Amino acid sequence: MTLNSRTSVLTGPRRLDWTSRAVPQPGAREVRVRVTRIGVCGSDVHYYSHGRIGPFVVNGPLVLGHEVSGVVDAVGAGVTRVNPGDRVALEPGVPCRRCAYCRTGAYNLCPDMTFMATPPVDGALTEYVLWPDDFVYPVPGSVSDDAAALLEPLAVGLWAARRGDVRPGHSVAVLGAGPVGCTTVMAARAVGATTIIAVDLEDFRLDLARQAGATHTLNARHADALAAIRELCAARDGLPLSHAGVDVAFETAGSLPTTRLTLAAPKPGGVAVLVGLPPDPEVSLDIVSAASREVTLRGVFRYANCYPAAVELAASGRVNLDALVTHRFPFTQTPDAFAFADREKRTSMKVMIDVR
Ligand SMILES: [Zn+2]
Ligand SMILES: [Zn+2]
């Protein structure tokens, strides 16, 4: 049985139109999911307002939305992981499973990745989606529909913590306390970081970062964040200011000042992890200081093998993803949700769309 799925489509700058798309019966190893919640991500809003992110350009109609939860509606042949009626989260990126990267488990680097809401692949702002069963994760009743959708940004935070090699007892700085900054705080705490410094320009974001597990918060409007981080770490580690810093610093704001701070904040021998990206590809940074302090710079591109841990952390109550939700819109008001998220970046954290 083919279903008609009401779908929100980006058809031009800041223009979302409604259409109906046919969703067929799932094929072998496919699952048909009735979408319940979509989290609006910064990348969705960027495509909505700018039509591109770096090399990814919107050239035709695009369905946004890649933070997805839903209920299994039908399953195809050979599906054993889930049954109709199961509540699930969808991992939005499906790799080829066959290339050299996939074969070593680094599937986030697969050259043939299909990633929701990245042109030309459609996302999930629709009533029904078909998805391969190995990227569908059942969630228990202790994980809300919102939280199940927000396993996606949590997966980013978990991957960032793995890339940073955060260990028990480490000190970390998270530079930018938006949704991914907060999930990076959650991940750092979950793997045992004991000093977690969150930096942002907005106090309400810093309050949410503290709820997420930050032990210290710094508003960079009112404080010299680098000096404050060094003082705190000098006292903590008994090191002179010249050699003080965090074990791992994370850029999670996508701005030039935070990128600079990410290279400057680690102690000698520490790690700088770029989760966000500065707005311009070519920026001037003090790499001499970073190199002479033996700071290791690591990039982050999405995540691999993080959903199982994300489900466990959310299910056990070790992380509270629901706390990140600040605004909510019904599916029928999807255009308003995007206009709001675009306009109110400074006053909103996570905007959710209730598909049903
Ligand atoms: Zn996202
Ligand atoms: Zn591959």
Image (tube, rainbow, N blue to C red):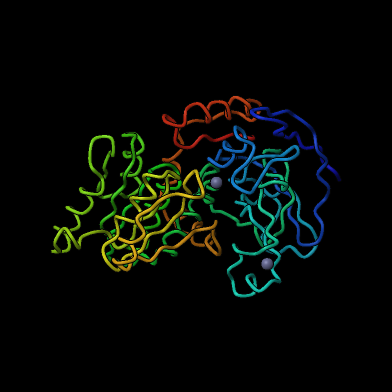
Regarding residue 8, the answer to whether it shows in the image is no
Measured as percent of width and height from the top left, residue 144 is found at 51, 44
Measured as percent of width and height from the top left, residue 128 is found at 73, 42
Residue placed at 58% from the left, 68% from the top? 106
**Where is the N terminus found, in terms of image quarters?**
top right
**Where is the C terminus found, in terms of image quarters?**
top right
Q: Nearer the viewer, residue 221 or 340?
A: 221
Residue placed at 66% from the left, 26% from the top? 332
Horizontal placement of 69 versus 258: left or right? right
Regarding residue 293, the answer to whether it shows in the image is yes
Query: Which quadrant of the render holds ligand 2?
Result: bottom right
**Where is 339 relative to 296, above or below?**
above
Horizontal placement of 48 versus 238: left or right? right
Q: Nearer the viewer, residue 71 or 108?
A: 108
Measured as percent of width and height from the top left, residue 200 is found at 34, 40
Horizontal placement of 201 versus 154: left or right? left
Measured as percent of width and height from the top left, residue 305 is found at 55, 64
Q: Where, by quadrant of the figure, is residue 324 drawn?
A: top left
Residue placed at 24% from the left, 35% from the top? 222
Total marks placed: 0
Residue placed at 56% from the left, 42% from the top? 43
